[in-house]
Amino acid sequence: MTWTDPIVEEVRRVRHEYAARLHFDLDAIYQDLKSREAASGRTYVDLSSLRGQRAPAEKADQQSPGS
């Protein structure tokens, strides 16, 4: 017998219902989420400019001992 987490099940159900309302169309889901984001009035951080960059701690960890 497998134990199921009721919270995880609820999240999956709600996610499925949301996607179904938009006919499982990823473009429509994206546009809906972006419009909700804009309407919320909250400030969001855009980290897309950091793609491919390493954090300073990662750089320090990868330096050779003699450098």
Image (cartoon, rainbow, N blue to C red):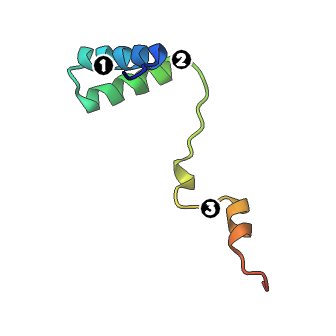
Pointer 3 with pointer 1, Cβ within 8 A: no
**What residue is disc 2 on?**
40
Taking the spot 25% from the left edge, 14% from the top edge, the residue there is 21
Residue 62, image quadrant = bottom right
Element under disc 3 = loop
Using residue 20 as the reference point, say whether residue 48 is left or right of it.
right
Residue 13, image quadrant = top left
Q: Amino acid at mark 3?
A: Arg
- Measure how far apart labels 1 and 2 are at the Cα level: 23 Å
- Would you call the spot at circle 3 few (<14 residues within 10 Å), some (14-19), or many (20 or more)? few
Q: Nearer the viewer, mark 1 or mark 2?
A: 1
Taking the spot 53% from the left edge, 17% from the top edge, the residue there is 40
Residue 46 sits above or below residue 4 on the image: below
Point out the tag, 3 or 1, that comes first from the N-terminus. 1
**What residue is disc 3 on?**
54
Where is residue 37 drawn, in percent x and y?
A: 49, 23
Element under disc 1 = helix
